[in-house]
Image (tube, grey):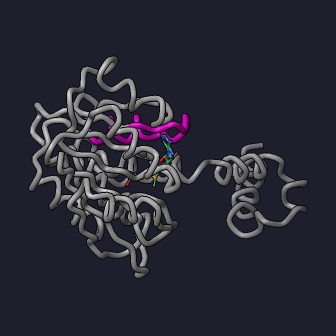
């Protein structure tokens, strides 16, 4: 009996390793279909989270970032700011030393973790994400990095959150903003930040993906409206050699 069971399990394992794409194998071994389907049905973000949980050190933000970057370079693309542009973002964060910072576009929490590790414990970092599943992955990623008490995650559309920042979240003005959500709403949201009086003289607004995928209306606005001292910082698109860059715009007040 035991011999028969071992033989059957071995045959299934062989089928899973060598023949699992064959329909006939799924018909023969329904459990093989269940195993392969559940693995491939997992979202990219969940697969990255699982990879981080296996490869990184719990409570160590640097190892979490390193694992996400390794996955991005060696396995599959993911739309994090990444390790190349990330170094430029790090420099802006260190130079600005914000006490209150807003991020638009949390995704899986990579840039939030990257930034908060450079800030003192007293700094307030608020990040906004409207995709429920991305926000849930970010919550787990941030907790794995040990930064759950340092990052305020808001799950909502940025257009709804920005007008509530003063009244609901007690923000007076922002020292720094990282804009990295959908590119066609960058312009709408910087104007919302202005009209809701969340920017003060010297607020540093950094926007990602100025070249790829590109935010031309936003770039044109910050460079020509006269309200900002704006500079472009060329770099690479995440996990590739393609050209991209960050726009750093300092509000004149
Ligand atoms: C490029 S990813 C952010 C990457 C992240 N900043 C990083 O570097 O790790 C953009 C994210 O913005 C979110 N997003 C897009 N438009 C949004 C909006 N209007 N409000 C809130 N989140 C938004 C998307 O769901 C997506 O998760």
Q: Measuring 50% from the left and 34% from the top, which residue is drawn there? A: 157
Q: Measuring 30% from the left and 45% from the top, which residue is drawn there? A: 112
The one of 36 and 248 positioned closer to us in this rendering: 248
Q: Measuring 32% from the left and 51% from the top, which residue is drawn there? A: 111
Horizontal placement of 217 versus 63: left or right?
right
Image quarter where the C terminus lies is top left
The quarter of the picture where residue 168 lies is top left
Residue 228 point in image, percent of width and height? 24, 56
Q: Number of labelled discs?
A: 0
Q: Magenta: predominant secondary structure element? A: helix
Residue 229 point in image, percent of width and height? 20, 61
Residue 156 point in image, percent of width and height? 49, 31
The one of 223 and 181 positioned closer to us in this rendering: 223
Q: Farthest residue toward the top?
A: 168
The one of 131 and 8 positioned closer to us in this rendering: 131
Tell me if residue 199 is in the magenta stretch. no
Residue 89 point in image, percent of width and height? 23, 60
Horizontal placement of 183 versus 207: left or right?
right
Image quarter where the N terminus lies is top right
Q: Which residues are magenta?
A: 128-145
The quarter of the picture where residue 233 lies is bottom left
Q: Measuring 31% from the left and 65% from the top, which residue is drawn there? A: 223
The quarter of the picture where residue 87 lies is bottom left
The one of 150 and 186 positioned closer to us in this rendering: 186
């Amino acid at each position: 009996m035991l011999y028969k069971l071992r033989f059957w399990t071995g045959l299934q394992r062989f089928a899973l390793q060598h023949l699992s794409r064959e329909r006939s194998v799924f018909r023969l071994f329904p459990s093989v279909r269940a195993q392969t389907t559940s693995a491939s049905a997992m979202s990219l973000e969940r697969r990255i989270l699982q990879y981080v949980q296996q490869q990184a050190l719990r409570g160590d933000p640097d190892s979490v970032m390193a694992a996400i970057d390794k996955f991005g370079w060696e396995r599959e693309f993911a739309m994090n700011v990444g390790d190349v542009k990330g170094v430029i973002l790090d420099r802006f964060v260190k130079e600005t030393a914000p006490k209150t910072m807003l991020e638009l576009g949390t995704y899986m929490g990579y840039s939030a973790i990257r930034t908060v590790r450079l800030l003192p414990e007293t700094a307030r970092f608020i990040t906004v994400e409207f995709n429920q599943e991305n926000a849930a992955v970010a919550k787990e990623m941030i907790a794995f990095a040990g930064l759950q008490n340092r990052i305020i995650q808001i799950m909502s559309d940025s257009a709804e959150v920005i007008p509530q920042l003063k009244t609901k979240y007690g923000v007076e003005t922002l020292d720094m903003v990282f804009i990295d959500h959908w590119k066609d709403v960058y312009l709408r949201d910087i104007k919302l930040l202005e009209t809701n009086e969340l920017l003060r003289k010297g607020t540093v607004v950094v926007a990602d993906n100025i070249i790829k995928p590109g935010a031309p209306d936003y770039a044109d606005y910050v460079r020509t409206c006269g309200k900002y001292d704006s500079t472009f910082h060329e770099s690479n698109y995440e996990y590739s050699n393609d050209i991209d860059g960050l726009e750093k715009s300092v509000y004149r007040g």
